[in-house]
Structures are given as C-alpha cells and as structure tokens.
Image (tube, rainbow, N blue to C red):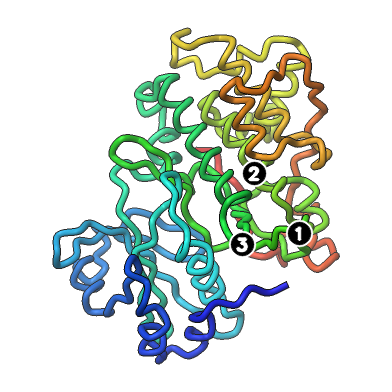
Amino acid sequence: MKFCFPWSTCFSCPSNTLNVNRSLKGDEDFRVFAYNELKAASQSFHPSNKIGEGGFGSVYKGRLRDGTFVAIKVLAVEPESMRGEREFISELAALSNIKHENLVKLRGCCVNGAERFLVYDQLENNSLSHTFLGGVQNRVKFSWTLRRDVSLGVARGLTYLHEEAKPRIVHRDIKARNILLDQDFTPKVADFGLAKLFADSTSYVSTRVAGTLGYLAPEYAVTGHLSRKSDVYSFGVLLMEIVSGRPVVDFHERYGEQYLVDKAWELYRENTLVELVDPVLNGNFPEEEAVRFLKVALLCVQEIAKKRPEISEALKMLTDETEIRNVEILQPGPVPDLMDVRIGGRRHPPSSFSTEVSPVIAQ
C-alpha cells in the first residue's frame, strides 16, 4: 500500500528546491525556507543553539527575521541507505496536512544539497524527558494535575492520529523524548520520522522494526507486524513513566536490568499498585485516579495486542467515562531485547541490528 503526495518525488534530487516550492505553493501554513535564512536564524547552527539530538539528526533553536522562534531539525542524507531522506519524507507526509493542539506544528522545510531541514514551532519547555525526567528537582515541579493533563493530552493527540487523520497515522516511536511541552506545559507529540500511514481498512503492515527498546510492543519487535496497538503499548509505558517518575529501564547492581512494566505488573498482582506512584508527590494526589491511570497503562501493555484498548477507549478510561473496575487485566508480554528483534523475518544479533532502534538509557 502506498500513499502518494504531490511533493513526494521532489526530494530524490538534492537540487530540486524549485520543485518543492511549486508543489507546496498553495499551502498557506507551510513555507519552503531558503538555506541562508535558516543559517542566519540559528547563527550558522552554532553549538550553543543546539537543543536536541537524536538518531536522525540534531535540532537547533533559531529566530527568523520576523522575530518568530523556531526549532530547526537538520537531517543529513546517507546516499547508500537514503537514511535521512526517508525520515524527511515521513515527517512531511505525516504533518503537512494535520493540525491538532497536541501535535507539534510543522512550519516548513528546506533542501540544501544532501541536507534536509524541517522547521517547527519552538516549544519553551523542551521535551518531557528533559523537563520531567531530568532528576528529582524536575519531578517535584510536576504536580499530579500536571501529570494528568500531560497524559490526557498525549492520548488526545494519538487519538487524532489513529482515528481522525486522513490517512491514519501510526507514530512508531512514542516516548518521553518525543513529547514536547509548550509554555503552558501543553504536550505536543513530535518526531514523525518513523511514522507510517494507514488506510482505514488496514489493520497492520509488515515493516522493518524501528523505535526505542523498552517502548517497543513485543509482537512488533519479534514479527515486524505494526498496528495501532503498537502505539498503544508505547503509550502505556509512557503513562507508567509519567505517574511513577521512574525510568523505563533501570539498572540494579545486584539484579541487573529492571523494567518498569514488570514492576507495575508485580505490584498489581500484590494489590499495591499505589506504591508505584512517584514518591516526590508526597501523597498529594487522588489515590483512586492514580491507580486507575496505572491500570489503564497495564491494559495498554498486555501481551495480546487484541486485548489492548484502542487509544480512544484508553482516553475514556483515563477520564473515567468508561468504568474499568471489573475489566480483566492480562499479563504484559516480555520486554524484547536486541536478540529478540527480527528484521525481514530473521533474528539479528546486536552487531547487525538496525541503528533505527536505540536502546533506552535510564534517565
């Protein structure tokens, strides 16, 4: 299945900036920037203006001539693998025609030789990973109300992607680093470099595994079958992170790697799930609501994908529109490691594994 866009062939040649301009000329909300404008805005991409770095490139803050503050994502294309080009096209396909309060806004793009640039609104409070999980002092600033609002905002953004966007969009890399926060701490789902587009009738697609270990749904990691429920799994892990303040993967000198999903299941079975709530809240949270959030998270990470709720249903559970008191929660699937992940139907050892999948580092 393929989706065609009028500009999708414009980027196969580094010199096709003119074609990009023609293709997007009618889009009032989207600009094709000149390279020199972005260079000036970021002070020649000075290291002091770097605000982020990921598997697909670096992000710089900048100020345009009209005074607008932006975030500029720089992608370098690798000729042999076309890495960088794919991510550039994916983000354009996902974001050029969608608008939602809880999705990052794409302002435009730029093609300069082998470099690709994506321009977004700059969000004042960086990422959830940076601002919230950056240490105890950061977490103290996140009240229960703020944690609840961020969680619901992410769920609303995903609901739009899965059920309202045309075509439907599966993000493939939901994690704390890809949730940005504006000046009011409104969450914005960001980084659509791995996104896949789905027709309404499509339940799943087979694709090369990509994402972040710890957030990857087990069935997707092992079979390469990607569905909306893959995002639901990742959202469940993120929800646990927000409520608990704990890293997705922690390392204990005696016990080795410890996974947040496993800890949540252990406490649920002992009927002590409330113990997972972040201790820095000092009890300043509604216990019933916090436990409900964690139960919804566990429903989202169940091993059997069909048993996981749709993201819109998870949102209703979080807001207590749907009762979950008597809903059966099944055990989460085993967290996949590098030896479990398959590419093209074959198991690959870590040394040959796709660099698109990065291990989660405890933050």
- The residue wearing badge 1 is 201
**Callout 1: helix, strand or loop?**
loop
**Callout 2: helix, strand or loop?**
loop
Quarter the N terminus occupies: bottom right
- Whichever of callouts 1 and 2 sits on the residue coming sooner in the sequence is 1
Disc nearest the viewer among 1 and 2? 1
Q: Position of residue 77 (x, y in %)?
A: 49, 79
- The residue wearing badge 3 is 167
The answer for how far apart the CA atoms under marks 1 and 2 are is 26 Å
Residue 310, placed above or below residue 18: above
The answer for how far apart the CA atoms under marks 3 and 2 are is 24 Å
Q: Check disc 2: other Cα within 10 Å, few if <14, some if 14-19, many if 20+.
A: many
Residue occupying the point 35% across, 24% down: 141
- Whichever of callouts 3 and 2 sits on the residue coming sooner in the sequence is 3
* Left or right: where 173 falls relative to 349: left
- The residue wearing badge 2 is 215
- Number of marks present in the image shown: 3
Q: Position of residue 163 (x, y in %)?
A: 62, 49
